[in-house]
Amino acid sequence: MAVDPEKAIVLWPSYFDSRVSRTSGRRVPRRDAVEAPTARMLYDSVRALGLDCILELDKAYPRFWHRKEGRVLVEPKMSKTELISKVTANLKNLPRNE
């Protein structure tokens, strides 16, 4: 199934970044967050869950409009909260490509 951008769940790297405060957009507890996640890492994590997704590298999180960090559009097969918790668990186990 192809992802419909109009109905897709949007995931931003800032949701999972330990350097970002909750008020600035982090959605997970700091102990579960990772330092400087990339949109590519989110994409790999979502793909590991077996979900269809689209990687958009030229997008900027509205709160940080000046940096193009990218985003991932995910097919809505579960709630956004459930998706974020599953992606968080996968991000911890992904190898870092430095």
Image (tube, rainbow, N blue to C red):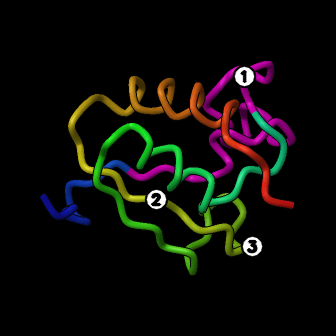
The residue at which mark 2 appears reads as: 72
Direction from residue 2 to residue 9 in the image, left or right: right
The quadrant of the image that shows the N terminus is bottom left
Direction from residue 19 to residue 81 in the image, left or right: left
Q: Secondary structure at mark 2?
A: strand
Name the residue: 32% across, 42% down.
50
Mark 1 crowdedness (10 Å alpha carbons): few <14, some 14-19, many ≥20 = some
Q: Earlier in the sequence, mark 3 or mark 2?
A: 3
Q: Position of residue 35 (x, y in %)?
A: 84, 42
Q: Secondary structure at mark 1?
A: loop
Q: Position of residue 85 (x, y in %)?
A: 51, 24
Label 2 to label 1, Cα distance in Å?
19 Å
The amino acid type of the residue labelled 2 equals Val
The residue at which mark 3 appears reads as: 67
Name the residue nearer the viewer: 37 or 15. 37
Q: Are marks 3 and 2 in contact (CB under 8 Å)?
A: no
The residue at which mark 1 appears reads as: 32
Q: Position of residue 72 (x, y in %)?
A: 46, 59
**Disc ID at residue 5:** none
The quadrant of the image that shows the C terminus is bottom right
- Among the 4 quarters of the image, the one containing residue 21: top right
Q: Earlier in the sequence, mark 1 or mark 3?
A: 1
* Highlighted range, magenta: 10-33
Name the residue: 73% across, 50% down.
37
Q: Nearer the viewer, mark 1 or mark 3?
A: 1
Name the residue nearer the viewer: 92 or 95. 95
Q: Are marks 2 and 1 in contact (CB under 8 Å)?
A: no
Query: Is 72 situated above or below 90?
Result: below
Direction from residue 29 to residue 54 in the image, left or right: left
